[in-house]
Amino acid sequence: MEVTGACNLRCRMCLVRYAPAISKKAGALSYEQFLELVDGMPELRRLTLQGLGEPLLSPHLLDMVEHAAARGIDVGFNTNGTLLGRDVAERLVAGGCGWLHVSLDGATAATYEDVRHGTDLRPHPGQFERVVSNLRGLVEARAGSGRPRIQLVFVAMRRNLRELPALVSLAADIGVDSIWVQNLSHDFCDTDPSGSYREIRQYAREEAVFGHELDAAGAVFGRAAACARRLGVELRLPRLEEPAGSDEGPGCTWPWTSAYVTHRGEVQPCCMVMGSDRAMMGRLDEASFEEIWQSQVYRDFRAALLNGEPPDVCRGCSLYRRVF
């Protein structure tokens, strides 16, 4: 669930940078909408409270975490970490947050701040140190409980890839549980090259690691993996090339097991598509989630993923192509 569409950053690889700004008030999912959807799913097992916006900008986020955790749901979210102060960290621990993913796209301030700009589209000095400090505070706040599980998320791009081994060392020093390295989520090949997605499409073409400079990227991944083994850090690395043929079934299982709901109540098959105009299964102000989940539109989307002719929006998806 996208609890807010607003964000306090404008990161180079995110659609938020290239789309009209959304205010904190306009972007917030109401607590009533949250309750209606979550409590309408008695068998819900895992809940991610995020989307394109920064979850900690939601005025209801902590209440949402506590409500879901009290239901026995494994709840967590991804955050850029800039607003993850000690008071927030302590309430997340007390409220039963199961996992927290914090984005850290560099091991130095220069590289990190070159990726994650402020709303003025410029680097903000001191931001890297604030996020690292907030991570240390979160690790201290959960001492003795082991929850939430803390994972760093590193988006591999040509501009930051060289710092991955150093990030592994930093992660070990901070005391997080794991690092998840991922490629850019989409190449936007299904969009008009001169249309509204042209800027992020161009960025993906210039910065994507998969399919480019494979030897150099593989060497960096190898050094990072060796460092992780030496320091005892759990490290997940993505593929750099699409597998030639696969007996693994569809590259994506989202449409059978999960769904993504935007702060506007739009139901989408996943969070990878970035942009509700590219794949929408229905709207919650027009039908219930159960009706949308069982609809012919959803059935046709699932069938396309199985017959070798996926929907256009899936063709450029890193998860579907198994390079995420």
Image (cartoon, rainbow, N blue to C red):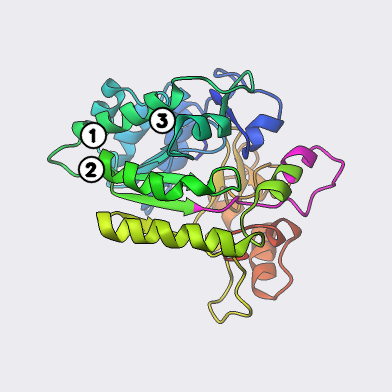
Q: What residue type is labelled 3?
A: Gly
Q: Can residue 150 be seen in this view?
A: no
From the image, state whether disc 3 or disc 1 is nearer to you.
Answer: 3
Look at mark 1 in the image and give the residue it sits on: 93
Residue 262: image x %, image y %?
Answer: 58, 38
Magenta range: 182-201
Secondary structure of the residue carrying numbered label 3: loop
Say whether disc 3 or disc 2 marks the residue closer to the N-terminus.
3
Say whether disc 1 or disc 2 marks the residue closer to the N-terminus.
1
Look at mark 3 in the image and give the residue it sits on: 81
| Residue beneath the point at 45% across and 49% down | 164
Q: Which of 241 and 77 is in front in this view?
A: 241
Q: Which of 196 and 27 is in front in this view?
A: 196
Q: Which residue lies furthest to the left in this view?
A: 144
Residue 297: image x %, image y %?
Answer: 69, 58
Q: How far apart are marks 3 and 1 (CA)?
A: 15 Å
Q: How far apart are marks 3 and 2 (CA)?
A: 17 Å
| Residue beneath the point at 41% across and 25% down | 60
Crowding at mark 2 (Cα within 10 Å: few <14, some 14-19, many 20+): some
Q: Distance between the residues labelled 1 and 2?
A: 6 Å
Secondary structure of the residue carrying numbered label 2: loop
Look at mark 2 in the image and give the residue it sits on: 147
Residue 239: image x %, image y %?
Answer: 53, 65
Q: Which amino acid does label 2 sit on?
A: Arg
